Image: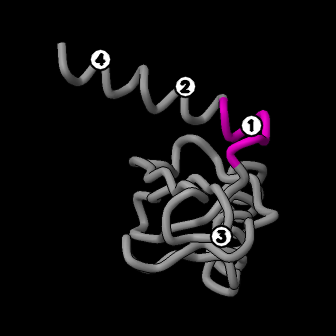
């Protein structure tokens, strides 16, 4: 029974995360769309496959990191957040390991 409970908890958590991401107005749907605000959801590292940097000096109003998830979603996050910086470092190390 305990295994079933843990699996159920994980499933509910994942569904909740996906719901928040899908309902978030801060999603960027393509490279041509700008992030207008940041998502409040802290994304798990395992869900990330890459990112794009949005500069405020270009067409868009705010600087942002657009995380691309393995589920095909894009989420705009604040590049000044500590967890975002750690996730970027993780992704850069992952890329280095893949290129060796």
> Real-space Cα distance between discs 2 and 1?
10 Å
- Coordinates of residue 22 in the picture (x, y in percent): 61, 83
Residue under pointer 1: 83
Q: Secondary structure at mark 4?
A: helix
- Which residue is pictured at 74% across the width and 67% down the height? 39
- Of 3 and 70, which appears nearest the observer? 70
- Coordinates of residue 49 in the picture (x, y in percent): 40, 48
| Closer to the eye: label 2 or 4 | 2
Assess disc 4: are there few (<14), some (14-19) or many (≥20) residues with their C-alpha within 10 Å of its C-alpha: few
Residue under pointer 2: 89
What range of the chain is rendered magenta?
A: 79-85
> Real-space Cα distance between discs 1 and 4?
21 Å
Asked if residue 43 shows in the view, the reply is yes
Assess disc 2: are there few (<14), some (14-19) or many (≥20) residues with their C-alpha within 10 Å of its C-alpha: few
Q: Residue furthest top?
A: 100
- Which residue is pictured at 65% across the width and 70% down the height? 61
- Which residue is pictured at 46% across the width and 79% down the height? 33
Looking at marks 2 and 1 on the same chain, the residue that comes earlier in the sequence is marked by 1
> Real-space Cα distance between discs 4 and 3?
34 Å
Q: Secondary structure at mark 2?
A: helix
Residue under pointer 3: 61
> Is residue 7 toward the left or the right of residue 50 in the image?
right
> Real-space Cα distance between discs 2 and 4?
12 Å
| Closer to the eye: label 4 or 3 | 3
Labelled disc at residue 97: 4
Examine the rendered structure and indicate whether residue 18 appears above or below residue 56: below
> Real-space Cα distance between discs 1 and 3?
22 Å
Looking at marks 2 and 4 on the same chain, the residue that comes earlier in the sequence is marked by 2
Looking at marks 2 and 3 on the same chain, the residue that comes earlier in the sequence is marked by 3
> Real-space Cα distance between discs 2 and 3?
25 Å
- Coordinates of residue 68 in the picture (x, y in percent): 45, 58
Q: Are marks 1 and 3 in contact (CB under 8 Å)?
A: no
């Amino acid at each position: 029974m305990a295994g079933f409970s843990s699996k159920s908890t994980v499933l509910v958590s994942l569904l909740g995360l996906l719901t928040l991401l899908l309902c978030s107005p801060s999603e960027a749907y393509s490279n041509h769309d700008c992030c207008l605000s940041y998502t409040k959801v802290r994304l798990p590292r395992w869900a990330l496959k890459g990112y794009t940097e949005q500069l405020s000096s270009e067409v868009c109003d705010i600087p942002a990191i657009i995380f691309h998830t393995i589920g095909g979603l894009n989420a705009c996050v604040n590049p000044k957040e500590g967890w975002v910086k750690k996730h970027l470092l993780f992704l850069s190390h992952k890329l280095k390991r893949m290129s060796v």
